[in-house]
Amino acid sequence: MCEIKSERLTAGEYIDFLKRTDLGSQYPKERFEERIPRLLENASISLVARDETHRVVGVLLGLTDFAYWLFVTDLGVDRSCVRQGIGRSLMKAALALAGGEKDIAVYLAANEKAVPFYERLGMKKADEVMKYNHIEWTEFTVE
């Protein structure tokens, strides 16, 4: 059993969590340690799932206008806790916090391994998403 709360993680807590999830390979290597604190500070929605020992087992970060849109930037679950409904619960809580499913459209960039999970949530691939990306991006995995 875990508890989901709106809270801001420290960079150290989040990096430790990334090591235990597949999210640890979604960030570029460039200035990683410098950029993670900004990510955590500026997300409109920051939800954290903790187990009974208070260890972080799930995280959802998102950007929203609280009227129409929610862009989920990060959704991850500790590898030892997958298939327990944590990701689904985080998504449901984020959607409610942003304004509810009758008002809010949810978008995200899914890791290929995560596509089946999002499809089980009822999400569909969208063709109309545009991208502008001219940043340096050296792939690495947080370990």
Image (cartoon, helix red, strand yellow):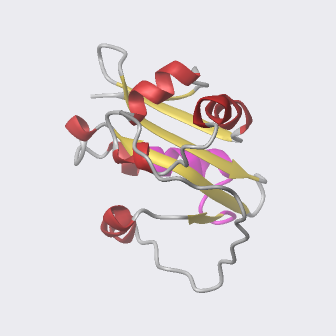
Q: Residue at x 30, y 46 (%)?
A: 85
Q: Which residues are magenta?
A: 90-104
The part of the image, by quadrant, that contains residue 1 is: top left
Residue 93 placement (x, y as % from top left): 52, 44
Q: Nearer the viewer, residue 27 or 79?
A: 27
Report whether residue 89 is seen: no
Number of numbered discs visible in the structure rendering: 0
Residue 110 placement (x, y as % from top left): 46, 64
Q: Quarter of the image containing the C terminus?
A: top left
Residue 119 placement (x, y as % from top left): 37, 71
Left or right of 115? Residue 5 is right
Q: Is residue 61 magenta?
A: no
Report whether residue 109 is seen: yes
39 versus 64 height, above or below:
above
Left or right of 123? Residue 99 is right
Residue 34 placement (x, y as % from top left): 66, 30
Q: Main secondary structure of the magenta part?
A: helix
Q: Is residue 97 magenta?
A: yes
Q: Residue at x 31, y 36 (%)?
A: 78
